[in-house]
Image: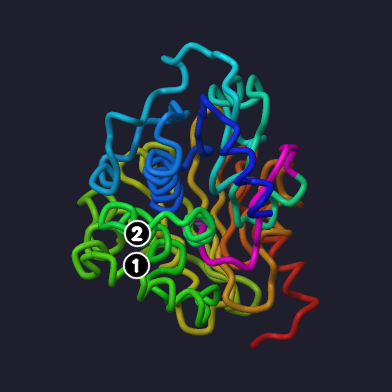
């Protein structure tokens, strides 16, 4: 996989890179680490990053914000190589035109639901904690030495996707990679405060609403809460489902956020045996993610979708013994 992906980069004079929406620290960290590494390894290559949504302002400090362009503002020209990181290219919107116009396509990803993505070459490992860990593998293969900005970008993805080394995807290799990145110049505490601990006032208030209104199902093994479309606009809901799954006795947390236009965003977290990526795929054709953290967008009203999803989780749990 490393050789095939390296050959794709080595032969490219023009490269377009992207990541599907709901950009997080792993997606931006992977794009930035890769952008800087390509600039060092193949300085003559022209690299453009095109996105379907604006760069999240809270992540601007881990990258060079001017390099992140709106896919709709960039003319589609057939690049030699298109790269998608941290997600399936079938989830791209405007950026899909850029991706599909390229002669060669590469995916660097760890989402198990991306396994059958239609690309020329891939660096894919669903057992890997973050996409930035895969990018570090590639940098090592290329002989690109770590510097402060690259290490910071890669570390951002590693701490975000492991919840600061708390989730089950944290392995001895994850911690060794983390140690290397910190040695290369990451400010560990500053980065974790900015990426995981600090929150906007809107998000803090949403957290309060979720914690004051959640309900339980399946004999207490499930905790779920819903937010209206208006509430969902008050703040970023990323990661708030963790408040539900880490309630004592709970194995599956479900956060449902109405998105307007008859759609509901569903976030699922599991800390038992239930594979929520499989469940998300069953609930919606584009649903998916990781075994313990997944999501889907489902058509319908908040109450109807809530009833459907809770029933699906209860049915799935009924075949597995409680912890
Ligand atoms: Mn990721």
Residue that badge 2 annotates: 146
Q: Position of residue 213 (x, y in %)?
A: 41, 62
Magenta stretch: give its range: 117-132
User: Which quarter of the image is occupied by the N terminus?
Assistant: bottom right
Residue 167 appears left or right of 91: left
SS class, disc 2: loop
Circle 1 Cα neighbour tier, 10 Å, few/some/many (<14 / 14–19 / ≥20): many
| Relative vertical location of residue 271 with respect to residue 212 in this rendering, above or below | below
Q: Residue at x 32, y 53 (%)?
A: 206
Mark 1 or mark 2: whose residue is earlier in sequence: 2
Q: Where is residue 88 in the image (x, y as percent from the top left)?
A: 64, 42
Q: Do the residues labelled 1 and 2 touch (CB within 8 Å)?
A: yes
Residue 166 appears left or right of 10: left
SS class, disc 1: helix
Q: Position of residue 68 (x, y in %)?
A: 36, 31
Q: Residue at x 69, y 47 (%)?
A: 4
Residue 231 appears left or right of 278: left
Residue that badge 1 annotates: 181
| Relative vertical location of residue 109 with respect to residue 36 in this rendering, above or below | below
Q: Can residue 44 be seen in this view?
A: yes
Depth check, mark 1 against mark 2: the one in front is 2
Circle 2 Cα neighbour tier, 10 Å, few/some/many (<14 / 14–19 / ≥20): many
Mark 2, ligand 1, within 8 Å: the answer is: no
| In the image, residue 70 lies in the stretch drawn in magenta | no
């Amino acid at each position: 996989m490393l050789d095939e992906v390296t050959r794709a980069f080595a032969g490219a004079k023009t490269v377009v890179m992207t990541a599907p929406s709901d950009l997080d620290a792993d997606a931006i960290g992977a794009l930035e680490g890769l952008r800087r590494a390509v600039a060092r390894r193949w300085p003559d290559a022209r690299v453009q990053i095109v996105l379907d949504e604006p760069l999240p302002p809270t992540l601007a400090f881990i990258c060079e914000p001017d390099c992140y362009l709106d896919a709709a503002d960039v003319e589609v020209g057939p690049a030699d190589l298109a790269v998608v990181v941290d997600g399936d290219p079938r989830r791209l919107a405007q950026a899909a035109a850029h991706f599909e116009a390229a002669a060669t396509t590469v995916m660097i990803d760890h989402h198990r639901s991306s396994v059958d993505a239609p690309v020329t070459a891939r660096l894919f490992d669903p057992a890997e904690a973050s996409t930035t860990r895969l990018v570090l593998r590639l940098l090592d293969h290329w002989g690109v030495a770590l510097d402060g900005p690259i290490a910071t970008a890669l570390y951002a993805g590693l701490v975000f996707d492991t919840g600061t080394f708390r989730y089950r995807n944290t392995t001895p290799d994850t911690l060794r990679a983390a140690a290397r990145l910190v040695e290369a110049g990451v400010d560990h505490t500053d980065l974790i405060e900015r990426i995981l601990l600090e929150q906007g006032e809107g998000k803090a208030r949403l957290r309060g609403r979720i914690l004051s209104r959640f309900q339980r199902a399946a004999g207490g093994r499930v905790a779920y809460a819903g937010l209206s479309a208006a509430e969902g606009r008050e703040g970023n809901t990323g990661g708030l489902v963790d408040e539900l799954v880490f309630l004592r006795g709970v194995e599956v947390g479900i956060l449902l956020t109405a998105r307007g236009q008859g759609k509901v965003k569903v976030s699922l977290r599991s800390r038992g045996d239930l594979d929520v990526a499989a469940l998300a795929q069953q609930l919606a054709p584009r649903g998916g993610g990781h075994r313990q953290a997944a999501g889907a967008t489902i058509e319908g009203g908040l109450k109807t979708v809530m009833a459907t999803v809770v029933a699906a989780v209860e049915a799935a749990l009924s075949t597995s013994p409680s912890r």
